Image (cartoon, rainbow, N blue to C red):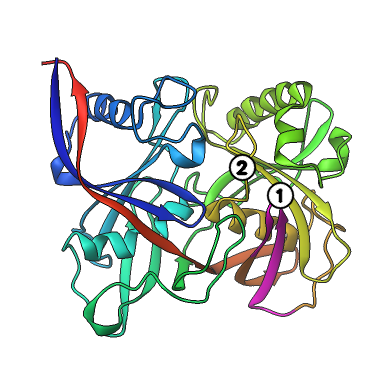
Amino acid sequence: MQQKAIPFLLMRGGSSRGPFFNRGDLPTDLSELSEVLISVTGSGHPLNIDGVGGGNAVTTKVAMLSKSDDDWADVDYFFAQVSVEKQLVDYKPTCGNMLTAVGPAAIEMGLIPITDSITEIKIRAVNTGAKIIARVQTPDNHVSYFGDTEIDGVPGTSAPIELLFLEVAGSSTGHLFPTGSPVNLIQGIEVTCMDVAMPMVIARASDFGLSGTETREELDANKEFFKQMESIRIEAGQLMGMGDVSQSVTPKFGLLNSVGEINQIGCRYFMPWETHPTVAVTGSQCLASCALAKGTVADGLMQTDGRSPVLVTLHHPMGTMDVLIDYSTDGDNYVNKSAGLVRTARKIAGGEIFAHLEE
């Protein structure tokens, strides 16, 4: 066995946290890469006691950055979701919260130069092919982590980072509604299988006998609900053309409920084997789009003012998240043009992290 030193930054992005690496410092082979990521996060133990993971799926995330060879993008963002208790790494999804810190991290790593008081960075999410523009506060020729922007689920305030997601409809499966229908009946429950920034299976909370206002702890303790939800998610994955998803964190699962306010809707988001403390940035776009599109399980749950772009407010366990959706409708056809959010990030630590590897 040996300990291998790898340069890294520990960053908070939105309401997630994890190590950021230069892709060139890591193995190209995915099985070898997984071995490294499992080691550095401490995957395989509920507390991740032997690594920098925090015993929760939002703190066992990894971002790997490199200069992009894409004609459009400046930076490639390769994401890995490392399991907390199982020594597994999933490279299928992306993470919009961690994406928030990609711009600052790319500048800190020297991959991208600062261009003005606000530096605009074009990012390609390698896992899904999604294109994102990030606008990072860079006054006095350095990244600023200080400001007045608050996001629910994170204490204090920080500098705002604007994210604009482009061409996100069908980014993983190739279709807005991968099953060909806005509603499918699976095991007696109506669901919408939708792919906007993140492939998701979305249902009404009431159809599971839930209010949609349950706390994260209450939902995590509801083992019967999780058993039923997972069975539906696996069947939906097959219908969505994603194959056997029993070992994959995608598609994600979401619940919606009415809050009785214009352009606002309640949600609960699952990762998928535990409840997200807030809601993922990618998932927020899919949930907001579901609320706007006709014929989905959200039909009748949210009243809109008919404007586009529209600011949709999602109510999650720790507060709210606003998603700016630019969309159009052609009859009953929903067309997602782009989605925008404002999030924050922070550099927590930097230096070398040690992976415990076999020689």
Task: Looking at the picture, tell me which residue is in the foreground, 152 or 250.
Answer: 152
Query: Which image quarter holds the N terminus?
Result: top left
- At 22% from the left and 80% from the top, the residue drawn is 141
Q: Is residue 356 above or below residue 202?
A: above
Front residue of this view, candidates 338 and 86: 86
Where residue 348 sits: x, y (%)? 34, 54
**Disc assigned to residue 276:** 2
x and y percent of residue 326 in the render? 60, 73
Which of marks 2 and 1 precedes in the sequence?
2
Q: Residue placed at 45% from the left, 40% from the top?
A: 59
Q: Which residues are magenta?
A: 307-321
Q: Given the image, on which type of amino acid does mark 2 rest?
A: His
Marks 1/2 in contact by CB < 8 Å: the verdict is yes
Q: Is residue 216 in the magenta section?
A: no
Mark 1 residue element? loop
Q: Residues within 10 Å of mark 1 (few under 14, many from 20)?
A: many
Q: CA distance from mark 1 to mark 2?
A: 8 Å
Q: Which mark is residue 317?
A: 1
- The structure residue drawn at horizontal position 69% and vertical position 62%, both measured from the top left corner, is 333
- Image coordinates of residue 12 in percent, x first then y, are 41, 53
Q: Relative to residue 227, is residue 169 drawn left or right?
A: left
